[in-house]
Amino acid sequence: GDSVTQMEGPVTLSEEAFLTINCTYTATGYPSLFWYVQYPGEGLQLLLKATKADDKGSNKGFEATYRKETTSFHLEKGSVQVSDSAVYFCALTTSHSGNTPLVFGKGTRLSVIA
Amino acid sequence: DVKVTQSSRYLVKRTGEKVFLECVQDMDHENMFWYRQDPGLGLRLIYFSYDVKMKEKGDIPEGYSVSREKKERFSLILESASTNQTSMYLCASTSGRAASAETQYFGPGTRLLVL
């Protein structure tokens, strides 16, 4: 079945450091890919998404590029802030109608220290 | 803005109790989902529903049931709570009407402790 593998955490960085969180996937067909973020004490919220190969999703300084050849969707940010401390989830769906649930990775906890 | 609300942020129940977790969305969404979130396991799908009175099992439905009598409300029921159901429960919804991959909107979660 479809699956998502993301790097184990926790990840601890100093403020202004460069962030990469790796995500690779296995899926039949052509999935859409997502990054969700969960801030402390909250539910998940969409950070960015990409629906086809070579698309780049971006939001709040975060970016991820849909790489079909390497089945990857790595999350990057050039300069992290303390407020970016959260759990990040990579996810996919092969449905384009929203009727099929997302398949999530296990999450990567990021802590940014001042 | 889409709003997904869950009836409780924290719940403490005893083993064997029947537990109801309620989720309401205010955007006329067709699809609703229940997940549980556990450290090291990420989010696992319990049940989902793509229409009133319709339900589909997810990856871990054992020990749970659901009810969707109205479009906006999706209830998760623990028939006889057990300690291994101590977890964070997250509800989500999507409109089901988009032409491309949809955002799932999540509630804030209910942290359930079963003693």
Image: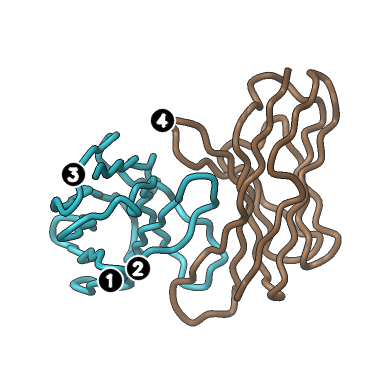
Question: Where does residue A11 sit, x and y in percent of width and height?
Answer: 25, 38
Q: Secondary structure at mark 1?
A: strand
User: What residue lies at 34% left-to-right and 62% top-to-bottom?
Assistant: A33
Q: Amino acid at mark 2?
A: Lys
Query: Which residue has dot 1 on it?
Result: A57
Task: Give the colour chain A carries in the figure.
Answer: cyan
- Quadrant of the rendering where the C terminus of chain A is positioned: top left
Which labelled disc corresponds to residue B40? 4
Query: Which residue has dot 2 on it?
Result: A49
Q: Secondary structure at mark 2?
A: strand
State which chain disc 3 sits on.
Answer: A
Are the residues flagged by discs 2 and 1 in contact, CB closer than 8 Å?
yes
Are the residues flagged by discs 1 and 4 in contact, CB closer than 8 Å?
no
Q: Secondary structure at mark 3?
A: strand
- Quadrant of the rendering where the N terminus of chain A is positioned: top left
Q: Is A58 positioned to the left or the right of A107 in the image?
A: left
Task: Give the colour chain B carries in the figure.
Answer: brown
User: What residue lies at 72% left-to-right and 71% top-to-bottom?
Assistant: B26
